[in-house]
């Protein structure tokens, strides 16, 4: 019953096997190898255009490097106030961005709205050179709340951003989870909707440590190789990061893995809803947020369940309750869910607070 | 005949197997797992004291993070003018060090001398606040020229550094190669000789991507966790970097792998010397530098040999010749060497320039 | 009728004269002169203790350098969400702080409250190394809204900060304006109330360009000389910045100048209140915020009045009205105020919105 | 007898008077005033083209901001190994340049040669992304050794730089001293010879604290206003820095002041040569370097002479002697020189080392 994060899962077996397959003979270092070239080609195929792709070992690196590329130090990066880049990367974007400023926007369910973005941008302009200049919009897909932006929502936000000359970044740590839910193509969910640069995550989806920064306009990636190297994020035995991506993207494996993780989240949400514990936000990816009583929370932990309590700032939750985040992954089994749900069900007192679900997709 | 670098080799099989073994079940992310704890314990054993150890995926990250920890932005880091941190990391130390300055010292065979260090330090002091302040000495062991510092040489340099309050860093990308040659313990080659912080490399020795920053005084590592995270170098599925280290360090595997690599370098050097191509610098680790005629160089490449030409700045080499670097690794075979040597031997013209070997260890 | 800012005023004549007096003969550069030493002594006298004082030409430099000294790059600096360091310095604190994060707190009238600070701090901790670490509290005295912190309010905030090991910084761009209102000594308003480092402004008070960073614990100023130099803020003909401070601080000139500016603000507030335009926030320094109809605003500008419209975010002001900031200075005359008030008075329509004044001091 | 630096001199009276003249009435802050606009126009006149000019209070700020504008963080700035930016600014270029690397080139008399530049550039290229990329050339005019580049020398260096896409920066802390010696126009000595950006100093020439960054292609100055602000170098009472420039540049005052300083240096050099103490490098600006015996040095200091001993690295000077730098300024008098020369003359023992003078202009 490990729902702590999708990064507590192991490496998906086919990806692990790909590492072993790649570990034969010599290969040039630092990305000058056949695996890397193949991964780059594969990414171009998947996104249906020439892209500039750079592989890095962590999502924090992908995000921070991508944002630094599209924002000057005196820029402001607008993002959700619960976004990973703002709350969980210990200032990596500010470090790589040489002191760039992140501006957190509120928005239900982890999503920035067009109105919210308009309002935030209205606060900038006409105060040069005293004020920082909005330089990028970063959205997370799927969001940290487990919701997803529809392609028209992405396009609307990107349009607003473009009118103010902001670059648009997508933190796609759970890109596949969003994609398989949306019935959209990777191209539609990104550059066709106005995304300029994507942090494309494979680690949470089943890889060991493999993320890619994708520039949809390769011309926007000038000197990014130096930027990555200088950040210490160019692996010497680079074939092994490329091999992970190749296996992840082969045979639609990435989509299958994400579908499984999402299906497990759906199961979990349905089971919990049935016993009076509906999710706080729509379950659109592989994250389920529910309000539990502290008593139930304690009992679940004793029984071996693993998950995190999240800040309930802005939610109307009483002191007896906690907001918890349950994350499923490619490795989650129906047994895990069944066991967890049963434990909840068997618990007599079930004080919780309901929130209306948002409209389904 | 791949002598391009020790990072063109694959992953050593036992280390690869350890990844598969570690990929079972769930584990907490970000280093809060059993493998990481075990790796930390093992590093303490190996260094015979309590150390603070932080695993990162690249050597550039290890070096740059370590140096930033021990040097203020207005510091000067003294290093050899051929050191990897100065010439091959695209300014990573300056980036992580927030604009710290690297000062390159000359020295035969990649080694800084006590006299050279004294002379460099004499140029600093008494000009505050206009001049940067020497804050750290960084030495590479084994050096970029394939030579090694004896423990008394390390101690002498560290003594000079300490008198000026400089921290002492060792870039140990090829730590094991130096260690097995010296007949010294890890403790003797580091903290007992005055090293404060070590970049301990496993990647070149056989790992996939595993390096450690080791602080011999754990108190000197305050907030290093934040520094690493902020640099994007904290892996989420951290057990897999720890598992590499555990396998590398188990059963003296790391020492055996390094002995093999060194022995291959010795073989290569002997074979080349016998045919009139003696190494330029003493072969004390797994690097062999030789001067080849451009004609031989061309022929070797046609025959499939892979290696790099290096700058011969400061060496008296004629225009018809080139300085080449041949690197052996755990994966190098006697057949590789035999074939390479035979190719050289069979080449009629062998114009080269000899340089006296330095004294043997 | 120039109420745009206190920096639109000229140089106060005695300070200007001091520049001429100092411009005789030679003096060592970079602060090794008698004026600088005298200014340092004078600052020690004024603050009734040994302080470490560093003179710089701008308030942005003073703030950014001071904050960088007391906060690591992975720190968070808590400040009011309308503070100058957050909104008007184009990211200078982030630049000098190597990517430090500023966190804006809300609070009526530009003031952080103890409750607000507690709440903000409650959001940090227990999430290392993913989250930045609160490292400093910065308060502005007088605030950007023209209000002032009482010494017990400062002490209460500083106590909370100290419990979490935060350094406490005061942006004293209008230090004198606050001081003369409070009937407190400089020591009481700073270190005796828990302030660790002060940006002490003289420019807005009448100097040409003179600010000081004051560390109340000189030991906390280690290497600050290098930090200032590296920021380009060590003037070569340093005697001229010191001479400004000496003249500013001589004969209680700084207090007299501030009393005049405050008195002018009081006059202005009284006159405006009398005609139905009460200040939005208590007038406790030299800033008067009032809500004007757009019609009146236009008329005043035609008549030659100069001032800035400020964001009315968080205030309930209708679209027909604007929030304006009127700043008085040592140079403001009663005639200016009389003329401005008369213009307002003569204006037929006076639609405005009242807000209750806060309790007087 | 103060020959310590040209910044030990006071403010030239006409410039001081201009400050008083400017201190009348109100003016908009931060450069939105008439003095600033007039100074910008005047600079365009002087340089015979539309330029983008930004005034800052220190030369270190001018240099560091200018270089950061034209160099990415992974760039290398090539400069003389005795240049002020490399040795005397405590790493300001690295700080403002976000970790940019400075590479020092040797060259007789403080001057980079075409051959030296070619050789340095030959060491870069073909090693991407591991190596930093040469991004700018910085030359000092007049040099730190008191010599000057002829316009054809500047053009030759700039040509080489341009072939490698380097920007060309001139540190003109003593711009006027060089200019009046060369019989060239400001345009000829800068953009017509290939200079892209100039740090134009007035402080050493007689101002209180006034330097300008001049971009000869205004398009290259995009966002420089933000960069300056963020560095804390935008003065609020900006008219006073502009007023200094206006007075400095009015009526060819700057040229007259520089001619005086140079003439004093010539006098000094002639007097010293006559008594057997010829300058080490050609005296082409207002700096005279001579070798004195330690005995004479001691005697001069006792008699009240003030000057600095400089590093004699690379010069063949015996241990009994020291290399000293004598700086003249607008304030230097013939009496100062006469007295100094007499003191030298009266000293019995005069052991010194001669060096041939370079060819005169």
Image: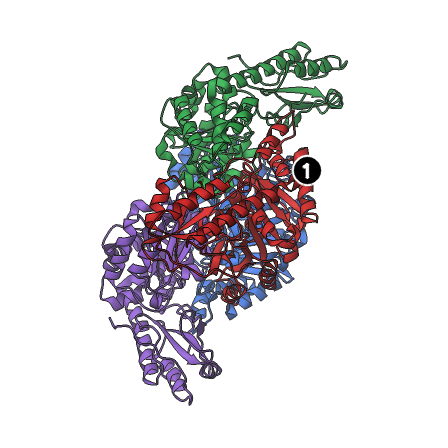
Chain colours: A red, B green, C purple, D blue
Q: Is residue C65 above or below residue B181?
A: below
Of residues B30 and C170, the one nearer the viewer is B30
Which of the 4 image quadrants contains residue B81? top right
* Between D232 and A286, the one nearer to me in the picture: A286
Residue hosting label 1: A37
Residue C125 % position (x, y) = 35, 47
In percent of width and height, residue A314 lies at 40, 59
Q: Is residue A240 or residue B232 the one in the foreground?
A: A240
Residue D71 in view of the camera = no
Image quarter where the N terminus of chain B lies is top right
Q: Looking at the image, which residue sits at the far top?
A: B274
Question: Could you tell me residue A224's position as x and y percent?
Answer: 61, 45
Q: Is residue D153 left or right of residue B184?
A: right
- In what element is the residue under mark 1? helix
Asked whether B89 or D269 is in front, the reply is: B89
D271 over A74 or under it: above or below:
above
């Amino acid at each position: 019953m490990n729902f702590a994060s999708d990064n507590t899962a192991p490496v998906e077996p086919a990806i692990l096997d790909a590492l072993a397959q790649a570990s034969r003979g010599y290969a040039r270092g630092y990305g000058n190898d056949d695996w890397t070239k193949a991964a780059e080609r594969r990414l171009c195929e998947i996104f249906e255009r020439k892209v500039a792709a750079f592989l890095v070992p962590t999502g924090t690196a992908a995000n921070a490097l991508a944002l630094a590329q599209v924002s000057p130090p005196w820029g402001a990066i607008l993002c959700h106030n619960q976004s990973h880049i703002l709350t969980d990367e210990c200032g990596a974007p500010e470090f790589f961005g040489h002191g760039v400023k992140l501006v957190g926007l509120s928005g239900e369910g982890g999503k920035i709205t067009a109105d919210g973005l308009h309002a935030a941008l209205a606060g900038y302009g006409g105060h040069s050179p005293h004020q920082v200049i909005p330089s990028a919009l970063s959205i997370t897909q799927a969001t940290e709340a487990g919701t997803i932006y529809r392609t028209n929502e992405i396009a609307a936000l990107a349009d607003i951003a473009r009118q103010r000359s902001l670059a648009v970044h997508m933190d796609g740590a759970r890109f596949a989870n969003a994609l398989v839910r949306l019935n959209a193509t990777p191209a539609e969910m990104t550059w066709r909707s106005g995304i300029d640069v994507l942090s494309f995550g494979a680690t949470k989806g089943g890889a060991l440590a493999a993320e890619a920064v994708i520039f949809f306009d390769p011309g926007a990636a000038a000197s990014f190789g130096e930027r990555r190297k200088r950040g210490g994020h160019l692996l010497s035995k680079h074939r092994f990061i490329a091999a992970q991506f190749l296996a992840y993207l082969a045979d639609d494996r990435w989509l299958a893995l994400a579908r499984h993780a999402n299906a497990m989240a759906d199961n979990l949400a349905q089971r919990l809803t049935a016993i009076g514990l509906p999710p706080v936000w729509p379950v659109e990816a592989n994250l389920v947020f529910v309000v539990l009583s502290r008593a139930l929370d304690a009992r679940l932990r004793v029984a071996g369940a693993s998950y995190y309590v999240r800040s309930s700032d802005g939610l109307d939750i009483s002191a007896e309750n906690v907001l918890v985040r349950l994350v499923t992954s490619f490795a989650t089994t129906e047994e895990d869910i069944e066991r967890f749900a049963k434990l909840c069900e068997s618990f007599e007192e079930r004080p919780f607070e309901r929130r209306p679900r948002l409209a389904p997709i």
